[in-house]
Image (cartoon, helix red, strand yellow):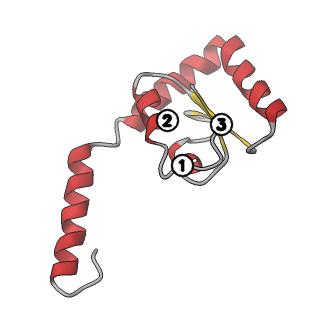
Amino acid sequence: MVTPSPKEGWGVTTIEGNACGSPVVASDAPGLRDAVRDGETGFLFPYGDVEALVERTRRLLVDEELRRRFSEAAVRWAGRFRWERSAEKTLDWLRGLSEGGEGR
C-alpha cells in the first residue's frame, strides 16, 4: 500500500492496510509517521521525494523475505488498535472533564 499524502489526521487507512497484511510506504508526514513503524510495518519517505518513494516501494516488491517480515509485523501492529479500546479511553477522558478535570 502506498500513501503519499502531505498529512493525515491519523492514517487509519494505513492501519487498515496493515490489518490485511499489507506493508505501507507512506510519506513521513504528520499522522502517517505515527501510524507506520518505519522499517518494521512499512517505510516512510520524505514527502515529495519521488525517488525515495520509488526506491522503498521497489524494495518491498522485489524482496519477498522483507515483504513477508513487514506483513507479519503489520498484522501484529494493527491488532493493537481496537474500537473498544478507543471508546474506553474516550469515555475516561470525558468522565475526567465532567468531574472538573482536564481529562485523563
Relative vertical location of residue 70 with respect to residue 27 in this rendering, above or below: above
- Find residue 30 and report its horizontal and vertical position in percent: 59, 54
Q: Nearer the viewer, mark 2 or mark 1?
A: 1
Q: What type is the residue that disc 2 sits on?
A: Thr
Q: Quadrant of the C terminus?
A: bottom left
Q: Are marks 2 and 1 in contact (CB under 8 Å)?
A: yes
Q: What type is the residue that disc 1 sits on?
A: Glu
Identify which residue, 90 or 5, lies in the foreground.
5
Which residue is under mark 3? 4
Q: Secondary structure at mark 3?
A: loop
Q: Which mark is residue 26?
A: none
Which residue is under mark 2? 14
- Find residue 96 and report its horizontal and vertical position in percent: 21, 77
Q: Residue at x 49, y 30 (%)?
A: 73
Q: Is residue 30 left or right of residue 53?
A: left
Which residue is under mark 1? 8
Q: Nearer the viewer, mark 2 or mark 3?
A: 3
Say which quarter of the image contains residue 95.
bottom left
Residue furthest to the bottom in view is 100
From mark 3 to mark 1, how far is it between C-alphas? 10 Å
Task: Specify few, some or many for label 1: CA neighbours under 10 Å numbering under 14, 14-19, or 20 or more.
Answer: some
Relative vertical location of residue 35 with respect to residue 100 in this rendering, above or below: above
From mark 2 to mark 3, how far is it between C-alphas? 11 Å
Q: Residue at x 71, y 12 (%)?
A: 62
**First in residue order: circle 2 vs circle 1:** 1
Q: Is residue 10 left or right of residue 1?
A: left
Q: Residue at x 20, y 67 (%)?
A: 92
